[in-house]
Structure formats: C-alpha cells, structure tokens
Image (cartoon, rainbow, N blue to C red):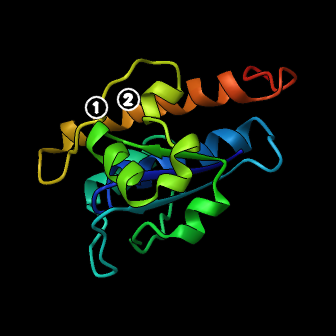
Amino acid sequence: MKALFVCTGNTCRSVMAEFLFKREAGRRSLEGWEARSAGLAAERYFVIPQAVRTALAQHGVQDVEHIPQLVTREQLRWADAVLPMTRAHRDALWDQFPEHRHKTRLFLEAAGLGERDVDDPIGRPDDVYFRCRDILAEGVRALIQNHAPSTADPRS
C-alpha cells in the first residue's frame, strides 16, 4: 500500500501520520508499504513545530527530516490511498482532482474508526499535539491491521 496523508500545511497531522505509518509498517515488516504526506496550502518555508518532533520522538520516531509540500497530481498518481485529515480536505481534493476521487477517503474512515475529522493542533499547547498524535497512531494501527496481509501479525 502506498498511502498519501493530506492536511493543510503539511507540518503537523499529515507529517505525524506519514512517520507513524512508516514506523508501524516497518515494525510489521510490510514490504512495499510506503507513505508520503502533503498539504493543500503547504509552503516549503513552513517549519515543523517542535511539539510534532517531541510527539513523534515519544513514539520512537527520531530525527524527523521533512520539507512541507503541496499536493500534486504526481503524488496522487503514486498513491494507492489518499487519506485527508478532514472532510474539508477530502472535498477540496475531490473538487481539484476528481480523477482520484475513487481512492480518496477520510483517514479515520479508511481506518475503520468512523467518518470523523482529525483536528488541527497548530498553535495549540503541546498536550493537544500529543492527543492528535495518539489519534493518528490509533488510526495508523487500524488502517494497517485492516489492510495488511493476514500473515502480518502485529504481535510478532
């Protein structure tokens, strides 16, 4: 599975989801499972908040190197699953890239956790980032569990 996580600025939610996905897929030894992230309003000069780095470090993800990127048609073609964080992101993707509508689903919905948004923590206290990370981690685990080959036992 090639997953493209999408949020607004590509500095918080989609970045955390990308790195959590890579870690979990690696932990389960899932070959060919890749992740990227992008934003609908990303700028290369946007800075990844320290709270994102801390939140990821607490889950074993160190040395996060990331430059925010705008969503492109090339990324959408690459992806098997396009996973926006909110209904607004999903709807914008459907409007801008209707040819990829068939593989664009709300992240938590694709994970089997209901059609709900992952709220943006940007500019909020660190504990909000950590709660966001926990929601994303749960979603990533569920997404992989629901779509991985049955031989990929998470306990091994």
75 to the left or right of 98? right
| In front of the other: 78 or 65 | 78
- Quarter of the figure that contains the N terminus: top right
Mark 2 — residue? 135
- Image-based side of 72 in relation to 42, left or right: right
How many other residues sit within 10 Å of disc 2, few (<14), some (14-19) or many (≥20)?
some
* Secondary element at image label 2: helix
The percent coordinates of residue 7 (x first, y second) are 34, 52
Q: Residue furthest left?
A: 124
Please give the name of the residue rendered at 65% of the width and 30% of the height, measured from the top-left corner: 144
* Residue bearing the label numbered 1: 131
Q: Quadrant of residue 86?
A: top left
Q: Can you tell which mark lies on residue 5? A: none
Could you tell me if residue 138 is visible in this image?
no
> What residue appears at the point 48 percent right and 59 percent down from the top-left corner?
37
Between the C-alphas of marks 2 and 1, the distance is: 6 Å
Residue 67 position by quadrant:
bottom left
Residue at image position (37%, 44%) is: 90
**Is disc 1 placed on a helix, strand or loop?**
helix
Residue 69: percent from the left, percent from the top?
41, 72
Other-residue count near label 1 (Cα within 10 Å), few / some / many at <14 / 14–19 / ≥20: some
**Residue farthest toward the bottom in the current orientation of the protein:** 45
- Residue appearing at x 32%, y 52% in the figure: 92
Residue 8 seen in the current view:
yes
Q: Quadrant of the C terminus?
A: top right
- The answer to whether marks 2 and 1 mark residues whose Cβ atoms lie closer than 8 Å is yes
Q: Nearer the viewer, residue 99 or 30?
A: 99
On the image, the x and y values in percent for residue 21 come to 58, 43
Vertical arrangement, residue 77 with respect to residue 60, above or below: below
The label nearer to you, 2 versus 1, is 2
Report the amino acid beneath label 1.
Answer: Arg
Give the residue type at disc 2: Ile
